[in-house]
Each structure stands twice: as C-alpha cells, then as structure tokens.
Image (spheres, helix red, strand yellow):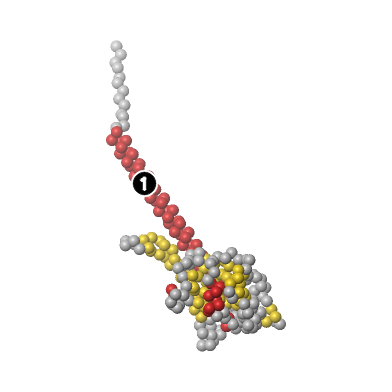
Amino acid sequence: MHSLRLRTYKAITMIEVLVFTALFGLFLSVIGVICVQGIKAFHKSRHRLTAQQEAQLSIDRLCRELNESYHPGISIKKSEFNGGEPGELWDAICFPTSRSNDDASGSTSMVGGKLQWNRYVVYFKKMGQKEVFRRVIQVSDHPDNRLYPESVPEDILEDFLTPSYPLNCPPSYSVATGSITDDRKIAREIHKIEFNMYNPTLIDYSLPIVHIFVESRVKVGTDSSGEDIFENTILTTDVKPSNH
C-alpha cells in the first residue's frame, strides 16, 4: 500500500505584500530626492559658472578696448544705485576708438602718423536690469579735434543710452545727436557694474586711470525666513589707456 505525501506551499501574505510595496516606494522616493537634488545642484553650478564666465569675458573685452583708448576722451556715468544723481538710471563708460570696424577687429585709423579718433564705444547697464551692452556711436560734430578727442558731454551721452536695447544694429540707428552703428549684448547676468575714473591731473600717467567693478550674483537657495540666498562673484581691475 502506497502512502500519500502531502506537499506544503508557503504563500505570500497580504501583509508581506504591503510591507514590500511600502519599502519599495520609500526606496524610490529616496532615489527620486537624490536625483532631483543632483539635477538642481548641476543647474546651479552651470548657472554659477556661466555668470562667472560672462563677468570675466565682459571685463576682459572692455579692458582690451579701453587700454588702447585716449584717456582725456573718457566719460563716465553712475546710476543712483552706485552713488550717482537721484533718478540716474545708467552705469556707463564712453571712450573714443580709432578702430575701423565696429567689433574692434579692424585696423586703426591714422592721419599723418597719428591716431584718428572718429567714433566712441559705450559699455552700459541700466539700473534694475542684468544685461550689459556695448554700443558704437558716432556723435554729430564731435570730437572737434579728431587727433585729440574730448569726452562726450553727459547730456549728449544720455541720448545714446535712452533708445531701447538691443537695437540689433547695423543698420545704423539715428538719435538726436548722432547715430548708433553697432549694438551688442555683452553679458546677461551681471548684478552690478561700476566705473570710477581717477583724476589724471592729480596722479602720474604711469598709474591706472579707470577702475572697473563687476559683480555677478547667482541664487543658491532661501533662508528660514524665505529670503533669497545669493552667491556673489566680484571682479575688479584697473586700466590705464595707452594713449594720453
């Protein structure tokens, strides 16, 4: 007579299924949080690097052009944010250029072995905006002496800052006191830019003439009170134009 052998099977209970589902969901949540934080950190790092590079590139380009300019022809404007007159909106530096091309890549204009200054370059930022722009301007009947250019008067310089930007020049854009032949965005994420000019009559020509301050700011979080937290990068430099 044959005996019957009973086989037993261990089944998964509903409680075990629920526990496994909960643990698996918790695991996915942790992985999700780690991925999200990693993506946010990546974007913050990229944004920070971009802002720093823009600040560095903008100041490098400005210094190269300003270095070969003519310092008696330099004029500066300060916004109210940087200690200028109440209601003043622009931080700007304007200086003569002898380059034949608007992008400063051309040859210099010469007359009788001397540099000829026909136009001016303006770097500027409007208070409350982050963009820094560069314009090449031609001022009507200015400078009077193209071998020894004088600075652009503040009220005339204002005429060239007021038009909406960017103008996407060329073609040239006419204003009341001349025309804008080129208009380009140099940087998009600049919190502050400030120009200061030392009085050349009080210092030796071997010393720097123009001081440039650039600050980029990137939001990195919020504090317990809900206020934004920023990381700042500050660049400063002094420039002495080679022609005086």
Q: Is residue 214 above or below residue 242?
A: above
Q: Is residue 74 visible?
A: no
Give 207 or 164, whichever is nearer the viewer.
Answer: 164
Q: Residue furthest top?
A: 1
Q: Is residue 3 visible?
A: yes
Q: How many marks?
A: 1
Q: Is residue 38 above or below residue 232?
A: above
Q: Which residue is mark 1?
A: 29
Q: Is residue 219 above or below residue 19?
A: below
Quadrant placement of the N terminus? top left
Residue 58: image quadrant is: bottom right
Q: Is residue 171 above or below residue 108?
A: above
Give 212 or 20, whichever is nearer the viewer.
Answer: 212
Give 185 or 88, whichever is nearer the viewer.
Answer: 88
Residue 17 is situated, as x and y percent measured from the top left of the image, at 32, 35
Residue 89 is situated, as x and y percent measured from the top left of the image, at 47, 73
Relative horizontal placement of residue 182, taking residue 218 as reference (left or right): right
Residue 207 is situated, as x and y percent measured from the top left of the image, at 53, 83
Quadrant placement of the C terminus? bottom right
Residue 114 is situated, as x and y percent measured from the top left of the image, at 67, 82
Name the residue: 29% across, 33% down: 14
Relative horizontal placement of residue 119, taking residue 203 as reference (left or right): right
- Structural crowding at the residue carrying mark 1, measured as other residues with C-alpha within 10 Å and reported as few (<14), some (14–19) or many (≥20): few
Name the residue: 66% across, 73% down: 100
Q: Residue furthest front?
A: 176
Give 95 or 182, whichever is nearer the viewer.
Answer: 182
The residue type indicated by label 1 comes to Ser
Name the residue: 51% across, 85% down: 199
> Element under label 1?
helix
Name the residue: 57% across, 83% down: 72
Relative horizontal placement of residue 232, taking residue 106 as reference (left or right): left
